[in-house]
Each structure stands twice: as C-alpha cells, then as structure tokens.
Image: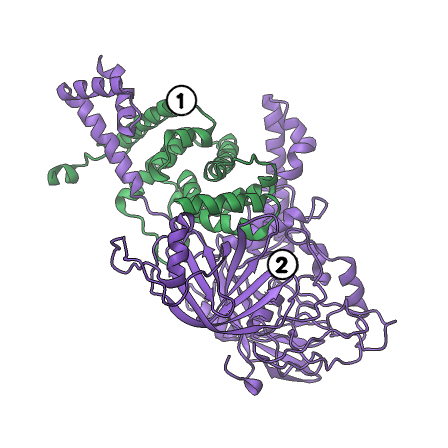
Chain colours: A purple, B green
Amino acid sequence: MDCTEIRPLISYYHDGEATPEERASVERHLASCEDCRRILAEYRTISGDMGDLAIPAPPVGLRRDVWRAIEAQQAGAGARVLPSSSTAATRKNKLVQFPQTKKKPGFAGMLTNTGSAWGRAIPAAMVVGAMFIVLTVILLMQRGTTVAAAHLLDKGPFSDYTKTVQVEFVRDVNSLDATRYTTVSKVDGGSTEVVTNVEKSYQRKTGAPGGVLEIKPVGTWDAGATYEVKVEADKINLNVGNDKMGKEAITDNFSTVAYTSTPTGTPTETPVQPSPTFQPTTVADNTAVPTAIVPAIEPTSTSVVVQASATPEPPRPTDTIAPRPSPTNTQTAPTVTASLPTNTPTSIPPTATPEVQPTATSAPSATATTQPGTPTATATSTRTATATPQLGTPTPRPPCTTMPVNGFGKIWTEQPQVRDRVGCPTEHETAIQTGASQQFVGGYMFWRGDTKRIYVFLSGSPNDTVGTWQEFPDTWNDGDPEPTPTHVLPAGAYEPVRGFGKLYRENPQIQQALGYATEPEQATTAAWQAYDRGYALWTSDKVIRFMFKDSNSNSNIWMRFEDTYVIPPATATPR
Amino acid sequence: MFAVAIDEHSWVSKAREGDAAAFEAIYNRYERRIYAFVYRLMGNAEDAYDLTQDTFVKAYMALPRTAPDLNLSAWLHRIASNACMDVLRRRKLIRWLPWETFDTNPAMEPTADDDPVGEFNQSETSGEVQTVLDKLSAKHRMALVLKEYQGMSCDEIGEVMGASRSAVKSLLFRAREEFRQVYLSKYGYAPGYEPDRVREQ
C-alpha cells in the first residue's frame, strides 16, 4: 500500500476506528515511512491543540435571554415587532426568527425560492435598500429626538411591587459610579424621600455600548406610589476618556398601581388580584415576537424603547429577585407578622371572597388589616384582560387557605413556576428539631427525624439547582451494627453511615447515582411544609428546596434556592 | 455516569410535557457545552451568544415532538450545528470580498469583552488553532470540533451531522488534511513543527 492509500487509514488509526487489518497495515507502513509517521504526529498535535482550546464561559445574561425568547415564542406569532435599544430585546428580535418565515414566505421569500440569480439578486437589493432605509430612519430619529443618556426602560405603573426597575445607560459608563450615583426616591406630594432599601446591580451590554442598572427593592415598592430615579450624570465617569456622562442630573419616574383589596362584606365590588407575573400596562410591548430579522444592526440609542424585562419572568430558579414584605409598607399593604415555623401563621384571604388574595407580595403571613379598596379601575381592567402567558400552562395564583410564610413564602411569591407547580400549603410550617443531612458528589440526603423518612436529592453536580428526588423510609435503628466499610475512599470522601448508610448500601442505583459523600453526616434543624403537590424543605444552612410531586413518576423534580428571606427587625425572632 | 442517564431521561420526558424546571435542568447541563461548541464553530462570542440562545429556544419548542429514546446531547448539538450552518450559509451569500483579503478577521478574535471574568485566556497556540479552524470548510470544522474539542465518537458525530460512521471517518480524514494544509500555508510549518517546538524536542 502506498502513502496515498494509507493516509486515510492513518486517520482512522488515530481515531481508534481502524479495523484490525487496517491497523496492521498502518503499523507496517509506519515502520518504514518517515513521511507518514510525521503525518500521524501532526494529527496528534492537531488533536492535542484542539483539546487544549479553552472552554469559554457563557455570558451571564444568556440564560435570561433564552427564557425571554422562549416566552416570546410562546406568546404567539401575532405580536408586533418594535425597535428597541434594549440589548435583550434586540437579541430577541434577531433570534426569534424561525416560525413564520418558512411557512408563509412573503414576497422576498418567494423570490428567494426561485433559485435563479435574479431570485437572489433582487432580494439582496431589497435587503440593502431596507438597510439603507432603516439606517436613515434611525439617523433621523436620533436627530429629531433627544435620547436621554439614561432612562427607565419601563415606568409602570407596576402591579408587581417587587418589580426590578431597569435604568438603561446608552453610553459606556463606570459601573461603580452608575451604581453609586443613581438613587431612587419616593415622591410624596412635593417632597421626596430617598429609598435606601434597594439593591443595585449594573450590567454592561454585550455587543453594544451602554448597560443596564437594575434596581430591586429589598422589600417591596409601596403601592400606589411614584418614585423618582435620579442619575447624577455629572458625577458618573465614562469608561473611555476623562469626560463625565453628562452635565447635570437626569431624572425619570416610575409608579406602582394602587393596592386594592376586597373588604370583607362587600362582595359586589370587583376585586383586584395583583400578581407579580402579570404586567398589564406593558402587555402590548411584551408580547412582541419578532418574525423577521433585519440586518444584524443593533441601534444603540433609538428613541423607542421596549421594556424587555417587563415580560413576565419565566422560571429562572437560579435568579433571586429578593423582594420581601416590607414592614413599613402599612399604608396600603397588609402588615406583616413574621411567623416562624413553630408559630401559628395567619391566613389572609377574606372569607367572603376566598378566591382573591389581597396582594402579590405581601406575604402570606400577613394579618389581614386590609383596607377598603382604593379604586384602580384602569389597572384592574387591563390586568384581567391581558394576562400574558408564561411558560407552561399559566395558572392564576391559587387561593390558599394557608399561605406560605418566611423563606418559603418569599420564594412561593417570587417564583411563579414554583407556586403554580406546588400549589397551596396543606399545613403550616413544621419545625424539625432532629434532622440530618449529607452532601454527595451526585446529590444530597436529608433525614427527617420526626417521621423517620429519608429524602434523596439527585443532581448532575453538587452545584445543580434542579434535580430529582425520592423518598424512603428510614429502616435503621439505633444500635444496629454498622458494617465494616468495604471501599477505600479517596481523601475528602466519606461513606454514609447509620440510616443513610443502610439506604445507600441497599439501593445500588441510589449508591451509583449519589457517588461518595463529600462531607460527614451533619445534624440540622429544618422546617417543612406540605403542599398540594409537593413539599418545601428549609435547612439550617439557609437552603430551601421545593420538592414537586408528580403522581405519574417515581422520580420527582426538586429545585433549590438560597433562603434570602430576612426577618423584619421589629418582629425578628431566631428561626 | 449512571446518575446523568437517570436524570436526563427523566428531565427530557418532563420537559417534553412542558415542564420548565426540567428544561432548566437540561439547560444547566448543556449551556456551557453548547456555547463552547458554537463558539468554536463561529469563532466569536457574539455569534456564540445568539446561536446558543437560538439552539435552546428551538430545543424547547421542538422537545414535545421528539422520540422517546432521544439522545439529548447529539440532538442539541445537531440543532446548534444547523443553526450555525444556516448563518454561515447566509453570510457566504452576501460576502463579496474574497476571504484571503483578510489576513485576520477582527470579528473572529476574542476580545476582553468576551471574557469579563478573565476565565478565558487565549494562548498563542489556541489563537493559531482557532484561526486555522475559521478557515476550514464549515463541515470539516464541525467534524473536527465535535471530535477533538467535544470529545465525541464517530457514531455520535454521525448522529449530529446526519452521516454514517464511515462517512464521518472519511470526513475527519479530509478535515485533518485541510487543517494541515491551511496551517502550513498560514504559518509556514506543519502543526507541531514550529521552529521553537522542534528545537525543544
């Protein structure tokens, strides 16, 4: 066999894909051919160099944009496309392109399909023409309107009192300055009061100048309030050069809808059901599903702004928005009593209209100091009429006789996918004084001492926030002999003992899925709450797991969250 | 790993029924892998961002129509590679300057912006490899990236690219040959035979 014939076989040989005969031929040939040995060495170098290529980390906003695009897809094909200077919205415009173009080609599409040179040339000319027109329009718009160097992407009025407000910066600014010199004040009559209880985070845009400062309330925005966002442009440095962002401060306002509850005994009044997942005032914009992609030009400062984030948030279990009931928010929202697992939480719903929850964000344990309804006719009608779909089958917040409180309540309130999936609590929180837990390579085990049950949480890696869980009885009794460990484990690895160990040894599948333990068994206190379709588990490492029960499967899903709930100082009691 | 198989199977069947949490689990597992794959195919972070997004959106919408024995990894890679091919094809149509005019394509070079946390440092060799990859035919590039970067077997690559195992073997051979030729013409020496490296050897 000469070199030309043997070359492909060298490639197969390198891949381990050569047959035994081919392998023998290659090895015979290589023994006598310097050139082909060199070729094999080059193949190996190529493999090695390619295998050494770095693995780039996906940008932070990718996950968010994926969910937004999915949601836009689900929102339907009839929505309109709006130009936007928001990065997320722009990306959505660029990417969500596949539905209708193939099914119903327009004029240009029909031409493209002719397959002739003209068929390609004409649409190409049209595209160039369209690009020219778009650019011209953008230039004219920029000339004709003053685009604020910073502005709110959505001004409300928001019915979601935990809404993260976004301030778009059109130029590249120092992120620390932007964070420091952007403040929110509540406008009360003629006076303003700075709101300090907010969290701010600035994110640069990818692929375009500027960025977005997200401001979220640590508690909630007051209902029916107007807030002024002030950007002190004269103090904010640009990233390039020595200039400031502007000569004077820029202000922009947003507002929240007034809170309305149904007073007991007035059943004729139409109740309002604020829900954090529905953003009525921006529905038209939110549902925009771009169907065509115009050139990959991102207008960086057009005067039309679409509020990308006003789209109802799709499930993003790793994101925490961090709203919680504000104890100072007694003006319109119910007062909050932080109740603990051992306390008796109070349920809110007025008995006369059990289908209505007084508020989206006032938590759950709120004692019902509801006020007579403040009329908010506009918000009410819009909200009910235009509820935007979310992932899966959206269900309205269920009317719960018992509402979840504390950390459970916070997540339940903030995370529609948890709420819709798990349903209402069927009991109050229970404090578990005797619990144990252990972390494994492929999951986590939790022992509930009061019921002698073991819960196994499987995951692909320790950092996964979603996985499957299973429940087992704990059949180990104190005094049972521990078997001699059979495995020689690497340093830092542990074999589970006692109840965990027994379950582990008796279930090879669980054993294989969990791998070895990465820590010894830990004692933990815990809180537990049963729901219509699952459980919530809080452990003293400040982690909350929602465990969803699926009647059709033995393998149910869990989702893990950090417990970011902070007990309001006035009523704080250690959990 | 066994745990992976159990979870994936469960997640796929749940996601197929519209379970967002299960899809989130799938996303968590494959985000980085798909992003890296697309990055290497397209050669820049902007495209990688857009096309990874595109891939997962398409996957979410198409999952309900998939077969029960879905090979999730191959399927996601296939969606991603189709998305990349579409874009590359479109760009080829409107490219009116010959490729050789550009010695280096600035859009293809990773920038500091691509790597805000500094995790991704492109070494000199990596830069050379990516430069050569960018000049290969799209199919050759794809086969090499799937094999050498994603570590897939010929069977898996066949599943991604819709080709038989023997076709993949031949494709890999031709891809390597093209890589060698491009490398040689670009740098003046064969892969692994740069003067410094040879001297060290």
Subunit that carries the residue with mark 1: B
Badge 2 is on which residue?
A533
How many numbered discs, if any?
2
Residue A246 left/right relative to A282: left
Residue A252 left/right relative to A212: right
Q: Nearer the viewer, residue A202 or A64?
A: A64
Q: CA distance from mark 2 to mark 1?
A: 50 Å
- Residue drawn at (32%, 61%) of the image: A482
The quadrant of the image that shows the N terminus of chain B is: top left
Badge 1 is on which residue?
B167
Subunit that carries the residue with mark 2: A
- Res. A245 in view: no
Q: Secondary structure at mark 2?
A: loop
Q: Tell me if residue B133 comes above or below residue B107 in the rendering.
A: above
Label at residue B123: none
Instruction: Give the image quarter of residue A153.
Output: bottom right
- Res. A27 in view: yes
Labelled pair 2, 1 in contact (Cβ < 8 Å): no
Q: Secondary structure at mark 1?
A: helix
Mark whose residue sits in front, 2 or 1: 2
